[in-house]
Image (cartoon, helix red, strand yellow):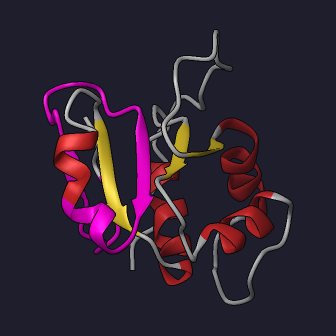
Amino acid sequence: MFQPVSALEYLRLNPKAQTLAVVCLVGPRFKEAPERWKDRAVAIVGDSSQNLRDVVRDLLANPQIRSIVFDGDCCGRDAYARFWNGETPSGWNLDEEHMTLVRRFVDLYDDDFGYRGPQQPFWPARIRYFE
């Protein structure tokens, strides 16, 4: 079960199923999300580069989530890509080793995605940063 630690509002589909991905989207795609993603166990959050730190915190607290999917043209996509390529914005107050875990074990995808074979094991404990 997906248990975020941030104040971000996620739309959860199939809440009793194991959440597999966080989906970022914006505008009209957000309204279409329940129909487009109804058969997936996902947590949907609005697209914004300002959400990135909180999404990373929520990923650390939920090591079972292995994917972020950008549904459509997302303005925050570049900020996520920069973070995944090693750039860490100042003032995050997150341990660098923990951010490396997210970069290593969580994959970024554009649009829908399918099962891509075996995934690496995830870190065994929830890492929680509270504000």
Q: Is residue 12 magenta?
A: yes
Residue 11 at x, y = what percent?
A: 20, 56
Q: Picture quarter containing residue 93?
A: bottom right
Q: Could you say which is closer to the camera, residue 100 or residue 78?
A: 78
Q: Could you say which is closer to the camera, residue 113 or residue 106?
A: 113
Q: Which residues are magenta?
A: 4-31
Quarter that holds the N terminus: top left
Number of marks in the rendered image: 0
Q: Could you say which is closer to the camera, residue 60 or residue 52?
A: 52
Q: Picture quarter containing residue 95?
A: bottom right
Q: Could you say which is closer to the camera, residue 25 or residue 85?
A: 25
Q: Residue at x 27, y 63 (%)?
A: 30
Q: Residue at x 68, y 20 (%)?
A: 120
Compared to residue 85, the image places residue 117 above or below, namely: above
Q: Residue at x 64, y 70 (%)?
A: 94
Residue 102 at x, y = what percent?
A: 66, 48
Q: Residue furthest right?
A: 86
Residue 9 at x, y = what percent?
A: 24, 68
Q: Is residue 23 left or right of residue 73?
A: left
Q: Residue at x 46, y 71 (%)?
A: 54
